[in-house]
Image (cartoon, grey):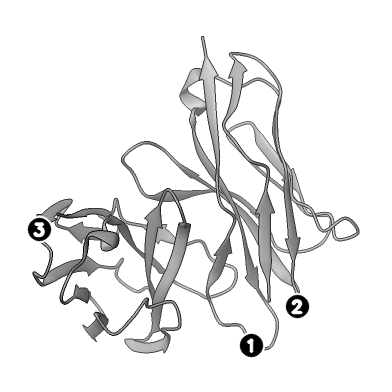
Amino acid sequence: GDSVTQMEGPVTLSEEAFLTINCTYTATGYPSLFWYVQYPGEGLQLLLKATKADDKGSNKGFEATYRKETTSFHLEKGSVQVSDSAVYFCALSDQGSSNTGKLIFGQGTTLQVKP
Amino acid sequence: DAGVIQSPRHEVTEMGQEVTLRCKPISGHDYLFWYRQTMMRGLELLIYFNNNVPIDDSGMPEDRFSAKMPNASFSTLKIQPSEPRDSAVYFCASSWDSAISPLHFGNGTRLTVT
């Protein structure tokens, strides 16, 4: 079945460092890809998305490019801040004929940014 | 819009008791999802509804768990009887469309079963 694999955390960075969180996926259809972020004590919220190959999603300085050839959707940010400390989830949704309407999440990667 | 509203925020109960978690989705959203989050297993989809009808409950752990959506603005997740291994954060989420629109999550209910 469809699945999402993220790099294990925690990822610990100093403020203003470059961030990459790797995400790869397996899917039989034509998925949309998402990054969600979860701050302490809160639910997940959408960070960015891409709906087809070569699309780049971006928001709040974060970017991710939908790479069909490598089945990847890596999250990047050029300069992280302490306020970016959170858990990041990669997810996919199948847009194929089954169109079940559910997301499949990776296991989450904890990011800790130190001042 | 107030977003997805879950209640209670925290629930502490003793093993064997019945627990009911509640969710009010965002108005106009056709899909409602129940997730469970634990350190060991991450985020697990338990069940989801489309237009108040359960579509996929394959993630429901066992018969002790049940979920209902009597109308478009309310859903419940019930555990009876509860067990310590049910301790987790339970999230409700809703979305307008299916595959391409984002999920909007509530802030979750932290359940502790002693």
Expressed as whole percent of the image width and height from the top left, the position of residue B66 reads: 25, 82
Q: Which chain carries label 2?
A: A
Closer to us: A61 or A24: A24
Residue B82: numbered disc: none
Residue at image mark 3: B13
Q: Which chain carries label 3?
A: B
User: Dot 3: within a 10 Å radius of its alpha carbon, few (fewer than 14), some, or many (20 or more) residues?
Assistant: some
Mark closer to the chain start, 1 or 2: 2
Q: Going 28% across and 85% down the picture, which residue do you hit?
A: B63
Q: In this view, does A80 lie to the left or right of B87?
A: right
Is the N terminus of chain A in the top left, top right, bottom left or bottom right quadrant? bottom right
Q: Which of marks 3 and 1 is in front?
A: 3
Q: Give the distance between the C-alpha atoms of the residues marked 2 and 3, in whole angstroms.
A: 43 Å
Expressed as whole percent of the image width and height from the top left, the position of residue A114 reads: 52, 14
Closer to us: A18 or A6: A6
Expressed as whole percent of the image width and height from the top left, the position of residue A88 reads: 55, 42
Three-letter amino acid code at disc 2? Gly
Q: Going 37% across and 88% down the picture, which residue do you hit?
A: B54
Q: Going 50% across and 74% down the picture, which residue do you hit?
A: B97
Badge 1 element: loop
Residue at image mark 2: A29
